[in-house]
Amino acid sequence: MSSIYGVFGGSHDPSVCLIVDGKIKFCVEEERFTRIKTGDNHPEVPRLALRRVEKESNISVKEADYLVFADHVSIPFANSLERTYTSYPHHLCHAASTYYTSGFQEKCLVLTMDAGGNNDSINLYTAENGELTKVYSDVYAANGNLAMMWGYATRSIKGTDGNGLFIWNLCKDEGKLMGMAPDGEYDEKFEKLFNNLIQYKDWKFFPNNTLGKTRYIVEMIRRLGWVDSDKKLANFSFALQNHTEKLILEFLEDIHEKYPEYSKICLAGGIFANVKLNQKINQLDWLDEIYVVPAMSDSGLSLGAAILKTRELGEGFSVPEKFNDVYLGFEYTFENLKKCIQGKPIHIEEFDAKKLAEDIDKGEIIGWFNGRMEFGPRALGARSILCKPNDLSVKNKLNNILKRYDTMPFAPVVMEEYFDDLFTETKSKYSGRFMTLCYDTKPEWIEKLPSVIQKSDGTARPQVVNKMTNKNYWEVINQFRELTGIPVLLNTSFNIHNEPIIEEPCRAVKHLTDGLLDKLVFENYVLQYKKF
């Protein structure tokens, strides 16, 4: 059996995965260590992440049995590692990352879409018995590209600051536009704009040069004042989201017509970071289940490359498996924490789920640092901030503390036992464990959960949690349910807006001592800062 390093870097979302004896040991993203969001750091390689994995695993990259990259390979970085390596195609790595972690034992479709990798921006595969068969691909230079439309619309829509830097950036701020889309309304001029940018028919997105046209047109409408108010920007976002959904759903219907016997689909690539789009796909009546890999962006490529090598060696993933969880980063002990709190007036108590639920019900904001860090863009109860979901004043306080836009919806974490009571859709709960798609909320719950429900369309992006995967996390929600009748908490990522999610305990303690939190949960301890 072998040790295999999978690496992606040199573009955006650099990451490292280590598989040992057929099992995933670590998967981590570089931004957690550089403390610079990936969208603000093009191009970057996972140098710090690799060093940490080497240290924690006691397996150096030179001593590992195999080193594999996902294309495109950063040749200078690869050469700096001073050992032989191989690489796998970009979209094949996306496909591997989602199919082989889907758990789909029956035949399914695998669709990957992004701004481009190698020469492709779309690949479609049929999959059965652990084998992927590519049945369609496009050449991004010759076709329209929805991911490029989103990236360069995001980058151009706010212009630049006084230093000439873009205010919003691609691979980072697209979620702001998606988040405000439900607040917008139909505007004919925006519909015409996006129709001119990109259309779809007969398996082709067209015309080409989406990047150049998007940059030019969005810059022009910004200068003309078409998006100079929140309402106008929301209308622009509505049209962008609506047009994207329309074209991809048309594409999926063509796929279904050609492959009618398939009722499950795996998704990967940056376009599927769009949880509203994923909801529309999940609602297609011919699909029984969808799965979006938790690291759907290029950060998941390192995992895909390592899986492909594992399969090639016959050491694992002969058929799709399921994640028990995606807590694949590093964990810290109380000894690590002691170094961070030394000399600070911090009171420490034993973890008490009932007392913590009472604190949350009083309106307190809780930092949650528990176990190994999550892999992917979502906070899933390892590095989270928690508060009550039924009080808008607490939501507004949290927005101010974290310097977030109010149009960016917060997410609910929901006890698995009560998921069907809250949401109308019952499909794709496995993917829902990783907060990768939205669901429609039942009417009787919309008013009860104003802080975590999108106010304009009644949707939410829940994390479905059970007692087996994160016991303390589940127990606090359960105690809150017993206290209030609500089996939900507000869960957001443990970071200030525009910073990556935190990785290590000293940063969590700084949030506490800076007054951003009322309490900090660290494993089985609760910390409170006592200022004199």
Image (spheres, grey):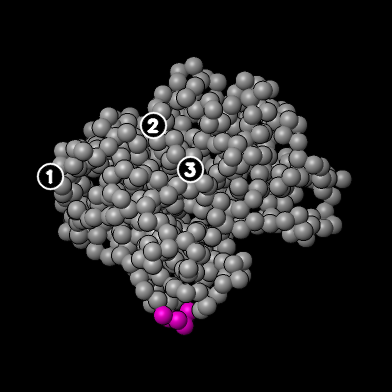
Q: Earlier in the sequence, mark 2 or mark 1?
A: 1
At horizontal 48% and vertical 69% (from top left) the residue drawn is: 2
Question: In the rendered structure, are the residues bearing label 2 and label 3 in contact, judged by CB atoms less than 8 Å apart?
Answer: no
When the figure is inspected, residue 95 is found, relative to residue 478, above or below; the finding is: below
At horizontal 59% and vertical 32% (from top left) the residue drawn is: 489
Give the residue pinned by disc 3.
434
Query: x and y percent of residue 281 in the render?
Result: 31, 36
Tag of residue 427: 2
Query: x and y percent of residue 80 in the render?
Result: 47, 81
At horizontal 28% and vertical 44% (from top left) the residue drawn is: 107
Say what amino acid the circle numbered 2 marks: Lys
Region in magenta = 79-84
Q: Which residue in the rendered view is the most extreme toward the top?
A: 444
Q: Earlier in the sequence, mark 2 or mark 3?
A: 2
| Dot 2 crowding, Cα within 10 Å, few <14, some 14–19, many 20+ | some
Q: Earlier in the sequence, mark 3 or mark 1?
A: 1
Give the residue pinned by disc 1.
202
Q: Is residue 491 left or right of residue 335?
A: left
Q: Give how far apart the Cα atoms at labels 2 and 1 are.
A: 29 Å
